[in-house]
Image: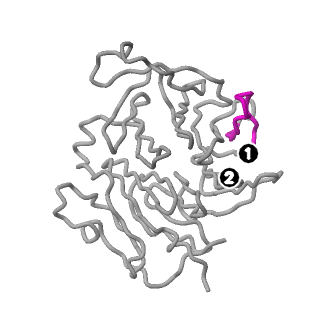
């Protein structure tokens, strides 16, 4: 397992790292520890808003994803999707639990009982609204209740939620051709997050992250957090896995270093960058060259 180099880390506050005069309100509780060498760089893709402004907007149930171009998207209020880079937004005609992008640009949406897509809409059929509403076209029934989604960054789709027949939580893989679902893993605790890196799945349930490789008949324990439940996972391109809790972000390693303090942060990895979505401020921060956090110890 990769481990974090345990030397020359510089702990910095958000104001120190990014300057207090950037024209936006910095999250008060954000603290980041980065290599003193400056090899890992941070920059805001979407500046944070004041917590009061976010509260007034009435956003709830935010869900953060990257599309194939690494553009940031947010789902909120189980209906609305917005591109945080361009401001493009639309609402879906049915309640949405989650969404995921594949590398061919396809967008898949988890409704309450079905996995679906947004069918093509002709320009003259688009509703004349400031935020247009788009239809939802079911493709296949979902295998569990309250399903959320994960992808391998290519063409695989995974769904996880509560399975009444098992009286537990499970993760399923979509069979090619939308022919159904194949059950991969079952847990007594709620599965909070899943990420895929090549042929390996990492699955977070409670304080434990499990590792399931293709061909394994049983998942192995990859990491156990000493205090907090895992709320998010991000892996891919050989970087990570990274994990999030309600209070911070760390990298899975022998030491389990949490190098970011940030409340209820959602995470994604793309290439050599880690993206942080801060639900309380709607800020999106990107850390570049994250491989420098994961170099093998000598």
In which quadrant of the rendered image does the N terminus lie? bottom right
Q: Which residue is mark 1?
A: 185
- Say if mark 2 contacts mark 1, CB within 8 Å: yes
- Seen from the viewer's position, the closer of residues 214 and 76 is 214
- Residue 126 rendering spot, x and y as whole percentages: 36, 17
Magenta residues, as a range? 168-186
Q: Is residue 235 magenta?
A: no
132 shown above or below 68: above
Percent x, y for residue 162?
Answer: 64, 35
- Looking at the image, which is closer to me, 265 or 200? 200
- Give the main secondary structure of the magenta stretch: strand
Q: Residue furthest top?
A: 125
Side of 237 relative to 1 (left or right): left
Mark 2 vs mark 1: in front: 2
- Whether residue 271 sits left or right of residue 285 in the image: it is right
Label 1 residue SS: strand
Placement of 133 over or under 51, stated as above or below: above
Mark 2 — residue? 201
x and y, in percent, of residue 95 in the image:
47, 24
Tag shown at residue 63: none
Residue at 68% x, 41% y: name it.
171
């Amino acid at each position: 397992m990769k481990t974090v180099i345990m030397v020359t880390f510089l702990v910095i506050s958000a104001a120190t790292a990014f300057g207090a005069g950037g024209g936006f309100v910095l999250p008060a509780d954000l603290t980041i520890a980065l290599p003193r060498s400056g090899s890992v760089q941070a920059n805001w893709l979407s500046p944070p808003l004041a917590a009061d402004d976010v509260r007034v907007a009435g956003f709830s149930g935010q869900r953060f994803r990257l599309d194939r171009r690494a553009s940031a998207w947010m789902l909120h209020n189980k209906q609305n999707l917005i591109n945080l880079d361009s401001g493009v937004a639309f609402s879906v005609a049915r309640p949405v639990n989650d969404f995921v992008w594949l590398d061919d640009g396809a967008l898949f949406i988890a409704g309450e009982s079905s996995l679906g897509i947004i069918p093509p809409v002709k320009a003259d059929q688009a509703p004349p609204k400031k935020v247009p509403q788009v239809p939802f076209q079911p493709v296949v029934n979902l295998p569990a209740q309250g399903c959320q989604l994960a992808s391998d960054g290519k063409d695989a789709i995974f769904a996880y939620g509560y399975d009444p027949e098992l009286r537990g939580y499970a993760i399923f893989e979509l069979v090619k051709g939308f022919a159904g679902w194949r059950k991969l893993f079952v847990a007594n605790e709620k599965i909070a997050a899943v990420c895929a890196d090549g042929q390996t799945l990492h699955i977070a349930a409670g304080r434990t992250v499990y590792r399931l490789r293709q061909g394994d008949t049983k998942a192995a324990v990859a990491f156990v957090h000493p205090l907090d439940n895992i709320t998010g996972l991000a892996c891919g391109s050989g970087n990570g896995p990274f994990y999030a809790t309600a209070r911070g972000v760390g990298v899975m390693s022998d030491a389990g270093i949490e190098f970011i303090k940030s409340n209820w942060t959602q995470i994604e990895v793309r290439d050599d960058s880690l993206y942080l979505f801060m639900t309380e401020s709607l800020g999106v921060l990107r850390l570049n060259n994250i491989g420098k956090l994961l170099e093998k110890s000598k």
